[in-house]
Amino acid sequence: MSGKDEAELSRLMRAAIAGDEKAYADFLHRIAALIRGFVRRKIVQGGVDPEDVVQETLLAIHVKRHTWRQDAPVLPWVYAIARFKLIDAFRRRGRRIEIDVDDIAETFAEPETETVSERDINRALDGLPPAQRSVVSAVSVEGRSIGETAAKFGISETAVRVSLHRGLTAIAKRFGQGRLGQGRFGRE
Amino acid sequence: MKTDDLIKALDADARSKAMSLRSAWWLAAGAAVVAAAAVFMMTIGPRPDFMVAAHTIRFLSKFVFTVVLAISAFALIRALSTPGAATGRAMAAMIAAPLLVAVAVVLELFMVPQALWGTRMIGSNMMICMSFIPLIGIGPLAIFLWMLRYGAPTRPVLAGTVAGLLAGGLAATFYAAHCFDDSPLFVATWYTIAIAALALLGALGGRLFVRW
């Protein structure tokens, strides 16, 4: 995590907020790897799946990107959200975790690994209204573009964008309110 | 869903827009002032001798306390609702209003004979003070808590408490224009209790309502 990375990531995020999708994809991939490195190092005991926290953090970064001040460095903002989501994940499972801010300095990027466990986000996705769920699935899991998704369901691109945005916001909200993990962890 | 798949969905939503938190806070502050002013004017309103009172130092000092509290709380709550923002200086500045009140109390104790201390502190409006500051502040508090949800406070209970202090500072500024008790002894006692009630309510709101 050098100053050069910081400047590059801030530049990508500024471009993303201005509507540059390519810059945003680049930003999210690089940020995801950094968050994964941070979260994996913090979770030493079982109970919390690191990749769930990575996904929750990415969603929070997305729906809260208007809280980033564009003249401030982006990484402290990203790690503050990751730290909050990690603590929240432990709290929901009735546990506590202490995280020093200094720990973040030693974080290294890590690639995603295949897992067989059921993702929290899949359960959140299942809780969406059918129209939103099918649009979010088409754009994410099936990897379709906005245009392809619109053609598939015979609706306008605007309708696809609206459903996608509402679906993602609803999933992020579900994570934030801790309405996940019932049955699996036995407590909320 | 793999993380790469999630990123595809987030990226496809890149063009969705939201007002920057900074602009939203200024808008919220404006709405809160309007809400507080509306309740104030419809209920108690300013005291009849407002223009005359405006020439006395005790009357004016009340506004110094409440405005300083509101300004420092506004700076702190904006920092607290932004992840990773430095809060140290804004936190330290929160001491300014209590410090000014403390200095004023000491001066008052020197200037007023001991026999009058009790009368000055009890005043004649303490029940109105303790009911109308929370009443004027409750609308602004709701606005500020809603704003915290729009932001991303990593310490929701603290942020909620500061929302209460901000609503309290704002409400007390209006209330001070109505109240005839201008002694710092009165302000230090009853204003503090009324504002603390709003801060407590804000902390509770932060705990229960500010999730993201």
Image: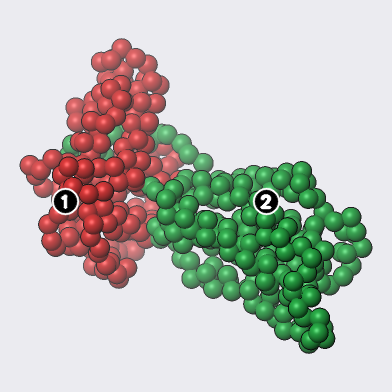
- In the rendered image, residue A110, in percent from the top left (x then y), is placed at 17, 54
SS at badge 2: helix
- For mark 2, does the 10 Å Cα neighbourhood hold few (<14), some (14 to 19), or many (20 or more) residues? many
Q: Colour of chain B?
A: green
Q: Tell me which chain the residue with mark 1 is part of.
A: A
The answer to whether any part of residue B180 appears in the image is: yes
Give the camera-side residue of A31 and A26: A31
Residue denoted by label 1: A49
Residue denoted by label 2: B136
SS at badge 1: loop
| Residue B113: mark | none
- In the rendered image, residue A13, in percent from the top left (x then y), is placed at 38, 47
Q: Quadrant of the N terminus of chain B?
A: top left
Q: Colour of chain A?
A: red
Is A35 drawn above or below residue B41 in the view shown? below
Is B103 drawn above or below residue B172 in the view shown? below
The answer to whether any part of residue B80 appears in the image is: no
Q: Quadrant of residue B128?
A: bottom right
